[in-house]
Image: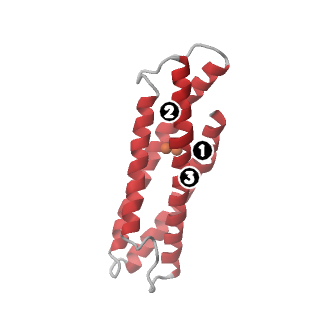
Amino acid sequence: LDSLIDHIVEKHHTYVRDRIPDIEPFLEKVVHVHGGRHPELLLVQEKFDEIKQELTDHMYKEENILFPQIKKLVSAIKNSSEYVIPPYGSIKNPIQMMEMEHESAGSGFKIIRENTHNLQPPSDACQTYRVVFALLDEFETDLHRHIHLENNILFPGAIAYESSIL
Ligand SMILES: [Fe+2]
Ligand SMILES: [Fe+2]
């Protein structure tokens, strides 16, 4: 599980942090140029901004609270040493919160897709418009892989480790 955590942070958290500043100025430009004829672009910008704020806080919590705690759990098992229960109790508590935040990011993208014909650029779209939709599509695909690794592998693994020593 520790190497999975390192993989998630190095690959997916880095991707999110690198891509946000690529997408934002393109989105700003497209809203400015095409927002009049395509008001849904304003909604896309607003939703992406919400997703950005949420993911930034979310990854901070994973990197500073949950992931270090999972590493402590792994090391206690590996070294048969004492595991100190954190103030928030079971690891299931922060995990449940992280899963709720994953759902929220997922529903933000669902709204973006519903309002943009599934991120298909319209026939009058300029190059930037096409690029920004392709970037959003790629961003969401990466987010799904990222969330899959956490929800379906890392979190159940951590819960199983915890229940094996408590
Ligand atoms: Fe994450
Ligand atoms: Fe997460």
Q: What element carries label 2?
A: helix
Residue ID for mark 3 = 145
The CA distance from mark 3 to mark 2 is: 19 Å
Residue 48 visible in rendering: no
Amino acid marked by disc 3: Arg
Q: Position of residue 162 (x, y in %)?
A: 52, 24
Mark 3 or mark 2, earlier in chain: 2
The amino acid type of the residue labelled 2 equals Leu
Q: Nearer the viewer, residue 72 or 165?
A: 165
Tell me if residue 1 comes above or below residue 149 in the rendering. Answer: above
Residue that badge 1 annotates: 8
Mark 1 beta carbon near ligand 1 (under 8 Å): yes
Which picture quadrant has residue 67?
A: top right
Per the image, label 3 sits on a secondary structure element best described as helix
Q: Position of residue 139 (x, y in %)?
A: 52, 60
Q: Name the residue under label 2.
A: 66
Query: Which is more foreground, mark 3 or mark 1?
Result: 3
